[in-house]
Image: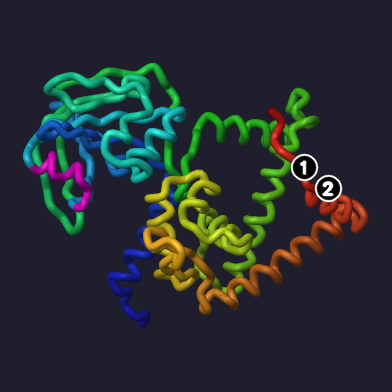
Amino acid sequence: MEKPQTAHEIAAALRLALRGLVRPVAVLTAEHRGVRHAMAATAFCEVSMDPPSMLVCINRSNATYTAVAEGTEIGLSLLSEEQEEVSRRCGGGAAGEDKFAVGEWLLEAGKPPRLADGCAAMVLRIAQCVDHGTHVVVIGEIVDIAPGPAPAPLAFHDGAYFFPLTQAALNLVAQSRKTGEADGMNDGYLMMDLMRAFYWFDEGLQSALKARGWQSISRSQSFTLANIALGIHRPSDIARNLGISRQAVSKMLQEMGEQGLITVEPDPDDKRASLVGFSEKSAQLRADALEILMQLERTIGERIGARALKALRAALGQDWGALPA
């Protein structure tokens, strides 16, 4: 009989499972006692169309909760794929009024701030709050809603921002190349070739690690380990390289620490910062990963020839210089 899972194990598995979902991104806002609040949110959905209602989950440690707890109306703005920076600021990348420095905000007396240039903006009158664990589930009836000019939503997947239309375009190009209907895209799109090559390596690595008995590692976690291997140890630098918010990186690093993959220690040169490194437990994982990557390279050499592989490595290893103006 299998040993029952602990609450800690279940929570870790749930986080990993939820990372696989593609979630829309919104900003929840409120104005309380002359102070404006904003937080990024992915835990929200519609509840009813009669009356029109929405549900959103708020961590009670978030400053926005104070306003919600006193029953003030809240704003819910659905972000477009152009509003990644808004999400970053409201997700922990900025404080206070700096959260409202980006975006076309509607600031009206007696109403919470809303974004005019997103997918939609609405005002919710709180109907019910349900406390559970670390969060409160807020159900609000929509008293005002305005569709925005942007049809394409911003989404979040596997710890990173996801742009549905951009991803669809890349998928279309990939499929067109396979079917011979690329209309000239076979030539001149080195970036897409490099992306497909990277995904080939990453998927081969993940599959081989799983075959050796290692727990599943998300692509964002794989990117993080690669950053550490390259000597990048500050969470803020890792967040910038992965294109995700510091809040998202903080959550991911916490999960990786719980899995025993990394250590997070105070930065001796900056008391406000921390440094990320490999844990002793991850030594065997890294050794297996390096062995698998070498095997994947040998496979490529067998398929395209040793000379072509050597030339490929030489070309990609060159310094391409500064970006063109």
The residue tagged with tag 2: helix, strand or loop? helix
Point out the stretch of residues depicted in magenta.
Answer: 61-69
Q: What label does residue 112 carry, if any?
A: none
Tell me which corner region of the image, top left, top right, bottom left or bottom right, holds residue 289.
bottom right
Q: Quadrant of the C terminus?
A: top right
- The residue to which callout 1 is attached is 320
Q: What label does residue 315 carry, if any?
A: 2
In the picture provided, is 180 more to the left or to the right than 125? right
**Residue 217 higher or lower than 161, as above or below:** below
Residue 205 locus on image (x, y percent): 64, 62
**Residue 46 higher or lower than 254, as above or below:** above
What residue sits 44% from the left and 70% below the top?
A: 259
64 magenta-colored: yes
In the picture provided, is 143 more to the left or to the right than 103? left
* Of pointers 2 and 1, the one earlier in the residue sequence: 2
Q: Residue furthest front?
A: 269
The residue tagged with tag 1: helix, strand or loop? loop
